[in-house]
Image (cartoon, helix red, strand yellow):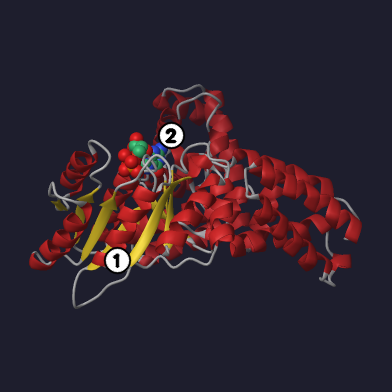
Amino acid sequence: MFEGITKSLGEAFKKLRGRGRLTAENVKDGLREVRRAFLEADVNFNVATDFIARVEAKSLGQDVLARVDPSEQIVKNVYEELCALMGPVDHKIPQRADRPVVLMLCGLQGSGKTTTAAKLALTLKGQNRKPMLAAADLQRPGAVEQLKTLGEQIGVPVYSEATNPVDVCRNAVAQAKRTLCDIVILDTAGRLQIDDALMDELKRIDKLVKPDECYLVVDAMIGQEAANVAKAFNDALELNACILTKLDGDARGGAAMSIKGVTGVPIKFIGMGEKVDKLEDFIPERMAGRIMGQGDMMGVVEKIASIQKQMSQEELAAQQAKIKDGNFTLDDFRKQFETIAKMGMKDMISRMPGMSEMIPEGEDPELALKRVQGMIDSMTKKERADPDLIDTPRRRRIAKGAGVEPHEVNQFLKQFDQVRVLMKQMASMSMWQRLKMVTG
Ligand code: GDP
């Protein structure tokens, strides 16, 4: 995701580095490159232009400039403005005591609406709510069946009847009330393009069923066109939020960065894959970090935190303290691997500092993890706590135990040393310092 813009922004910032101080001229120069990077990533022209104007005004108005490297100052301003451009976002989904909450999903055909309806239902189920899905897409052949299959898969009831979309929605709400479901998700029909028939149908549902919230599901792969689609739907329906799908693909960033700027409607969730568990909160700070090449440290940290909820607080605190003091041992490292394994590793590994270096080009990350685990497991407890104890004969034995060459053990231990240093640095860094470390 966002490889293009991350790379070109990196180059833009690099050009600014080393300039003695910020002047109107070099700010303009640097920001011209940033603007070019935005446009290449398919950000809406007006959004990009206004964005640059804001960063420029902010950068030139700062009087601490003389003492700071211009690139640092501008990177920071770009980051902050990016967060403001895409946020703020409230991830809460309404609750009511008197009747089921009704969420209406709308969007073009193929945007991922039906899939997202199921993802959302699963998320709500995870929050101890009782969702029901309403199959109101009577337009796309197979949509009703698809929703039923998904509903079965996630254990959420699906209401359907072969009448008309308004009746499906109304009767679904009545059924939800009877069966004590507390939230109904309406999977409405899309069209290949925005047309009057589609909008009329949606407006009718909106008027007669009165959903509590209306979310637009929109495909990130269509770039800034997503913002135009959002505008058209917002004009007709007053959207509460957008759900941006297919961000796991090679979307360039135009959709994520343009939607709120063009429409004022925030992105609330993102689709990160075809499977039903691939829905995430849209976090502007994290997205800005990704765009700017910070990797996804914060995302990883959060994901680990959610999995480690099972771990005791003391255990977590102890691990944090170890990282901070540089006492991060091979045992801790192995524990992290297990966590990664639980998380569906492949996408995670490349996002963790120090981890990706451990995997030779072209090697399957899963195999690489097994290889490293094998080496750690072949060490004694003492060696795991203090790898300096490992001499040549021990290295040979460990290699033999793990089925690798002795030099691989050597190489791994060296890399682990670097990871340890990196972890220590990152533990004591502020968010801004981390950003700088990676973009620098
Ligand atoms: P609908 O016509 O809007 O209901 O679209 P569907 O839910 O049928 O989705 C269209 C296609 O997009 C399907 O092949 C989905 O599997 C796929 N899809 C939906 N969301 C995502 C996502 O977040 N990532 C990826 N890679 N594919 C998705």
Where 203 falls versus 330 (above or below)? below
* Count of numbered marks: 2
Q: Which residue is drawn at 83% across and 58% down?
A: 70
Q: Residue 275 carries which label?
A: none
Give coordinates of residue 252: x percent, y percent: 58, 41
Q: Residue at x 72, y 62 (%)?
A: 77
Give coordinates of residue 409: x percent, y percent: 52, 30
| Picture quadrant of residue 24 | bottom right
Spatial CA distance of label 2 from label 1 is 55 Å
The crowd level at tag 1 (other Cα within 10 Å; few <14, some 14-19, many 20+) is few
Front one among 324 and 276: 276
Question: Which residue is at the far bottom?
Answer: 98
**Mark sitting earlier along the chain (2/1):** 1
Ligand 1 visible in quadrant: top left
Give coordinates of residue 286: x percent, y percent: 54, 56
The crowd level at tag 2 (other Cα within 10 Å; few <14, some 14-19, many 20+) is many
Asked which secondary structure carries label 2, the reply is helix
Q: Which mark is residue 207?
A: 1
Q: In this view, does 30 lie to the left or right of 113?
A: right
Quadrant holding the N terminus:
top right
Front one among 241 and 211: 211
Judging by the rendered image, the residue that carries numbered circle 2 is 369
Q: In this view, does 102 lie to the left or right of 323?
A: left
Q: Which amino acid does label 1 sit on?
A: Lys
Asked which secondary structure carries label 1, the reply is helix
Give coordinates of residue 35: x percent, y percent: 73, 49
Where 392 falls versus 28 (above or below)? above
Which mark lies nearer to you, 2 or 1? 1
Q: What residue type is labelled 2?
A: Leu
Mark 2: C-beta under 8 Å from nearest atom of ligand 1: no
Front one among 427 and 74: 74
